[in-house]
Structure formats: structure tokens, C-alpha cells
Amino acid sequence: MKRSTRFSNDGPNLDVQVDHVAAGGQIVEAEAQAVNTGVWQGGSCGGAYSEYLHCGGQIDFGVVLEGAPLTVRARGTSGSEQLQLVLDGEVVQTFALSTSLEDYQYTGEIAGKPVQLHFSNDGDWRDVQIDALTFGGVTHQAEDQAINTGVWQDGSYGGSYSEYLHCGGYVDFGVLWRRPDP
């Protein structure tokens, strides 16, 4: 699967230097890539073999990143809750939760994709507790995530830093990378 680093908020006096990408035990140098649409070369934006992004654009690393198993530790309050694993906006698996904290696994290409866990069947006194998500040897606590659209906080739905989903919504874990092997 192709991967790129994108500079998306170009403006006056904004430049980015990307040294390398490390994922799946690989280190890939930015200046070794043949496509860099954001570098200033030859009097215009776009070129190759540079670690700098001066214009809005991207460095295409073109590497296949290794997947690693993803484990979700979660439970429901009634035992009929469903939790969907959403990668890059696409539902890739639905977990049927029990009333005790259990581990649910997904194996597939995950590295470099935005990860969300969606509570997909709210109603009838159903709630979800997401303890943590583990990927590539790194544990990400749900209560450490800044976006939780299903938590009840301050008299309304939506907030952050909670492992509970009281209504249909999701916890956003951001983009996950597998920790490089030592």
C-alpha cells in the first residue's frame, strides 16, 4: 500500500522538513523519494529527492508497511452492543461485545490509517466501555484520546478523554504506526 506525507496548511513562512518515516521496522529517507510535489525546485513547486516541503504537496514514500494485529479491549453494559472498527473511513470489522472486558482482534493492514471505534447500535440502555486499543506493541488508552463523540459530558453528547460511549458515536485514535523492531 502506498504511503505519503502531506503538507496541507501551506502559507506565508510555513515550510516542513521531513527527515524520514519509520514504520514496520523500516526507515525510509524522505530525500530518497522520487516524488515530492511540495518541494521548490527549478522555480516552481514539485520535484524529487528532497526532504523539504515548501508548497502544499506531498512526499510519496511508495512503501508497503507491515500490518500488525490490532486488539481492542472493550465491554458492553447489556451484552448486545456492537463496536465497529473503522479504518480510513471504512468499516472493516464489527465486534459483538459481552458484558465483561474482553479482547477482540483484527488482523489486516492498519499502519498509517486513521482508526476509530464506533458504537453502532445505541438504544435500549446499551453503553460501551473501551478500555484500550493495542497495536504493534503499543497500548493506546481510550481515556487518553481527545475525540469521543459518544460520551456524555457537561450535559450533552460529545467530548474527550473518556473510555465510555453512552450514545452512538466513536473514539478517534488517530493514525497508528507499528513501533519499529529494535
Image (cartoon, rainbow, N blue to C red):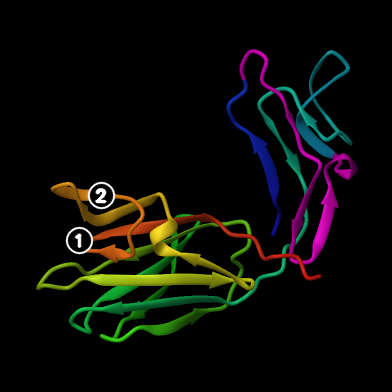
Q: Amino acid at mark 2?
A: Gly
Residue 151 spot, x, y in % from top left: 25, 57
Residue topped by disc 1: 167
Residue 65 spot, x, y in % from top left: 72, 63
Residue appearing at x 44%, y 70% in the figure: 132
Q: SS for tag 1?
A: loop
Of all residues shown, which one is farthest toward the left? 124
- Assign the C terminus to one quadrant of the image: bottom right
The reply, left or right, for residue 154 in relation to residue 106 is left
Residue topped by disc 2: 158
The reply, left or right, for residue 94 in relation to residue 181 is left
Residue in the foreground of this view, choosing between 24 and 120: 24
User: Which residues make up the magenta segment?
Assistant: 11-34
Above or below: residue 31 compared with residue 1: above
Q: SS for tag 2?
A: strand
Q: Amino acid at mark 1?
A: Cys
Residue appearing at x 19%, y 67% in the figure: 122
Residue 2 sits in quarter: bottom right
Residue appearing at x 33%, y 64% in the figure: 163
